[in-house]
Amino acid sequence: MLLKHPGVVVRLFSNALSAQGRLEAIRSSFCNQCYLPSAGELVDLWQEHRCLDISSEAAVALTAGELSNGNLNLQPWMMAVDNNDLQKAVALGIANIPYLMGRAQALGINARPLEGAVAYALMTTLLRLSVDKVWKTIKRSWSWVKRQRRKPAGGLG
């Protein structure tokens, strides 16, 4: 039962989870329920961000959390991922923003941080990669997501 509700695990047993475990719970809660991490969770994870394996989905979740209740200038999550995961974050964001927006609306959640996270991922990509690579990422976003859907792991795509 607890595996189906990672948010409950985080609330009840957060001290028992490693930083990577807390990050995975946040990623899963965001992908499944549009849950945004709290300011405290963001600060705690940022202190250990160099030791974390931050996936593209986690980066979107953390960035949306920052836009909701944190400070992207102090904790720029998209800058903490490698270029490959940054491109995946853009592709996932573009392909999944209609789903995320609809889900947020159905759950009564403010959708602005979701929009902003995708925009911030794109902006960060433009700062770090050539315009040609960014354009290719945008053009290939749907095909990349289709490939990811064939994989058994759950998530945004």
Image (tube, helix red, strand yellow):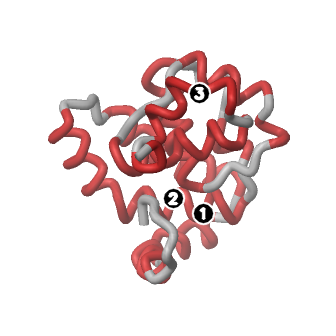
Residue under the image location 23 percent in, 47 percent down: 103
Is there CB contact under 8 Å for labels 2 and 1? yes
Q: Earlier in the sequence, mark 3 or mark 1?
A: 3
Three-letter code for the amino acid on which mark 3 is drawn: Phe
Q: Residue furthest right?
A: 51
Give me the C-alpha separation between circle 3 and circle 1: 33 Å
Residue under the image location 59 percent in, 27 percent down: 13
Three-letter code for the amino acid on which mark 1 is drawn: Gln
**At numbered mark 2, what does the secondary structure look like: helix, strand or loop?**
helix
User: In which quadrant of the rendered view does residue 130 lie?
Assistant: bottom right
The image shows residue 91 at horizontal and vertical percentages of 48, 65
Between residue 35 and residue 79, name the one nearer to us: 35
Give me the C-alpha separation between circle 3 and circle 2: 32 Å
For discs 3 and 2, the disc positioned in front in the rendered view = 3
Residue under the image location 20 percent in, 48 percent down: 102
Horizontally, is 105 left or right of 79 in the view? left
Three-letter code for the amino acid on which mark 2 is drawn: Val
Label 1 crowd (10 A; few <14 / some 14-19 / many >=20)? many
Horizontally, is 15 left or right of 33 in the view? right
Disc sitting over residue 90 in the figure: 2
Q: Residue furthest left?
A: 106
Residue at which label 3 appears: 13
The image shows residue 28 at horizontal and vertical percentages of 48, 48
The image shows residue 4 at horizontal and vertical percentages of 41, 49
Label 3 crowd (10 A; few <14 / some 14-19 / many >=20)? few
Residue at which label 1 appears: 87
Q: Earlier in the sequence, mark 3 or mark 2?
A: 3
Label 2 crowd (10 A; few <14 / some 14-19 / many >=20)? many
Q: With respect to residue 58, does 140 lie above or below?
A: below
For discs 3 and 1, the disc positioned in front in the rendered view = 3
Between residue 142 and residue 14, name the one nearer to us: 14
